[in-house]
Amino acid sequence: MASQKNWLRTYTLTAGKQGRQGMEIGNTDSVDQTVLHVSFSVEKSDTEAANTAKVQIWNLSDRNLKILEQKDCMVELKAGYGNNRALIFAGNVTSAVTTPDGADRLTELQVVDGRVALRDTKIRVSLNGVVDAQTVYGIIAGQMGLPIRYAKGLSFKKFPNGYSFVGKGRTCLKKMARACGHVWTIQNNTIQITKKGTPVSTTGFLLDDETGLISIPKRITISQDAKSKKDQIGYEVQYFLNGAIGVNDTVKLKSSAASGYFRVYKVTMDGDNMEGDWICTAQLVEV
C-alpha cells in the first residue's frame, strides 16, 4: 500500500539572496505540470557539523543560473508526493558548476545548512544581573538570524553575575550548550537545543509498511563520542521519502524485526524526479 501512496513525485526549489529577486522552479502551479529534471542527495546528522546536500538541475535558464551563482545564495528544496511536500533541505550554495550533459546542460549545486550564520556571525553579548541561559540562546539565535527550537524539559543555567561574550556565534553557542549540559545542531536553518540522546520533540511519526517503510530494519551499532566510551545499538531503516521526519525527531517503528520509539540520529534523502524511487535511509536509536 505504501507504494500506491508514493508515486506522484513533486518538488519546488526556491533560491536567491535576501533583498534580491529570486527564482522558483518545480511544481509551482500544479502536481502534473511539466517541470525541470532534478535530483538530490541530502545528508543530515545530530552533530555540530553542518548538514550538506548535492542538488542537480538540468537546463536552467541563464537568468536562474546567475541567481544561483551569487555568493551565498540561499536554497530551499521541498519534495514529496502530490500536494504533500515537506522542506527537506535549506542552506547556502557553496558551489554551482554547470557542464554539458549530452544535449542538455547540467548544473550541480553543493549546499551547506547554516553556512553563512556559522561562518560570518560575530556575537556581542553584555548582560548585567542574574542572566538565564535561555535569554543568551535567544540573543545568539537573533544575531545569527536563525530561529531556535528547544527540546521539552530542558533546564537552563543561571549566571548570577551577568554574562558577556564577544566572538564567533558558533563559539558562543558551543560554550552555552556545554555550560548547560546541552547539545546543539542546525537543521534546515533552525538551531536545535537538546540534551544528548534526547529527541527535540516527543511527538512520534509512525513508520510501518503502511506509511512507507521498505524492507526489514537492520540492526546496527552506532559509535558514540570518545568521552562516553559507549556504543549504542540501533536500527537502519529505509522508507519512501518523508521530509517531515528530521534529525532528533521521534519515530514509532513497527515491524517484525523491531518495534518501539526511536530517535532519528542520522538520515539521508535521495531522489530523482524522472526515475527511481525517492528513498530515505535513517539510523535510529532508542529514546
Image (tube, rainbow, N blue to C red):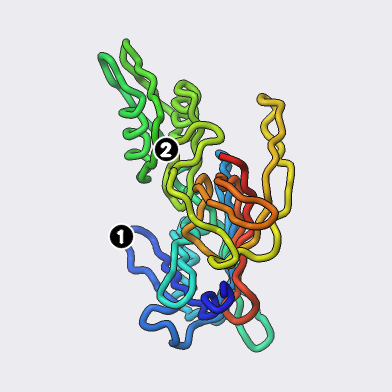
Q: Is residue 134 above or below residue 150?
A: above
Q: Where is residue 240 in the image (x, y as percent from the top left)?
A: 58, 67
Name the residue located 73 percent from the left edge and 49 percent from the top edge.
Answer: 219
Q: Nearer the viewer, residue 261 or 73?
A: 261
- Mark nearest the camera among 2 and 1 is 2
Q: Where is residue 268 in the image (x, y as percent from the top left)?
A: 61, 57
Q: Could you tell which of marks 2 and 1 lies nearer the N-terminus?
A: 1
Outermost residue, front side = 256
Q: Is residue 124 visible?
A: no
Image-based side of 285 in relation to 88, left or right: right
Q: How many marks?
A: 2
Q: How crowded is mark 1: few (under 14 residues within 10 Å), some or many (20 or more)?
A: few
**Quadrant assignment, res 231:** top right
Q: Is residue 174 above or below residue 116?
A: above
Name the residue located 55 percent from the left edge and 79 percent from the top edge.
Answer: 4
- Distance (Cα) linking label 2 and label 1: 32 Å
Q: Nearer the viewer, residue 69 or 170?
A: 170
Residue assigned mark 2: 151
Name the residue located 56 percent from the left edge and 50 percent from the top edge.
Answer: 51
* Quarter of the picture holding the C terminus: top right
Q: Secondary structure under badge 1?
A: loop
Q: Is residue 119 above or below residue 274?
A: above
**Quadrant assignment, res 15:** bottom left
Residue assigned mark 1: 19
Q: Nearer the viewer, residue 174 or 221?
A: 221
Q: Secondary structure under badge 2?
A: loop
Task: Please state which amino acid type lies under the numbered disc 1.
Answer: Gly
* Quarter of the picture holding the N terminus: bottom right
Image-based side of 265 in relation to 155, left or right: right
